[in-house]
Amino acid sequence: MIVYHVTTFSKLKKYKETGYINPPVRAWKNFKYAEFMSIRTGRRVILRLKFPDNVKKLEGHFNQAVVLNKPYKFEGF
């Protein structure tokens, strides 16, 4: 499943240094909602990630948010 993770430049730097995004890794199933959250929170980075299809859904959040409760290997760019 392709999802979109909203974050900051400083966290992105940490992801690159460690090679992982520490849990819980929250993301949006739809880019439109990720973009909305980015604007609302001031987090200017949106990453496209691949989650397992059986990832847990978060309650609320327009039924578009999911969470991965294990470290996500970040291979960067």
Image (cartoon, helix red, strand yellow):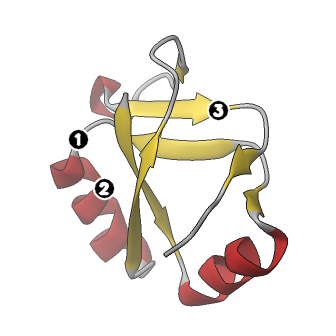
10 left or right, relative to 66: right
- Is 15 or 9 nearer to us in this picture? 15
Which mark sits nearer the N-terminus, 2 or 3?
2
The residue to which callout 1 is attached is: 30
Q: Residues within 10 Å of mark 3 (few under 14, many from 20)?
A: some
- Is 49 or 43 nearer to us in this picture? 49
Residue in the picture at 50% in, 32% down: 51
The residue to which callout 3 is attached is: 68
Q: Residues within 10 Å of mark 2 (few under 14, many from 20)?
A: many
Residue in the picture at 16% in, 52% down: 32
Determine contact: label 1, label 2, CB under 8 Å.
yes
26 left or right, relative to 43: right
Where disc 2 sits, the SS reads: helix
**Of marks 2 and 3, the one in the foreground:** 3
Q: Amino acid at mark 1?
A: Asn
Q: Choose top left, top right, bottom left or bottom right for residue 67.
A: top right
Position of the N terminus, as image quadrant, is: top left
| Whole-percent x, y for residue 38 in the image | 35, 70
Residue in the picture at 56% in, 70% down: 76
- Is 65 or 49 nearer to us in this picture? 49
Q: Amino acid at mark 2?
A: Ala
| Whole-percent x, y for residue 5 in the image | 46, 55
- Is 6 or 20 nearer to us in this picture? 20
Question: Does residue 35 sit above or below 64 in this rendering?
Answer: below
Q: Amino acid at mark 3?
A: Leu
Question: Does residue 51 sit above or below 26 in this rendering?
Answer: above
Cα gap from disc 2 to disc 3, whole angstroms: 16 Å
| Whole-percent x, y for residue 25 in the image | 64, 45
Q: Choose top left, top right, bottom left or bottom right for residue 71.
A: top right
Q: Choose top left, top right, bottom left or bottom right for residue 23.
A: top right
The residue to which callout 2 is attached is: 34
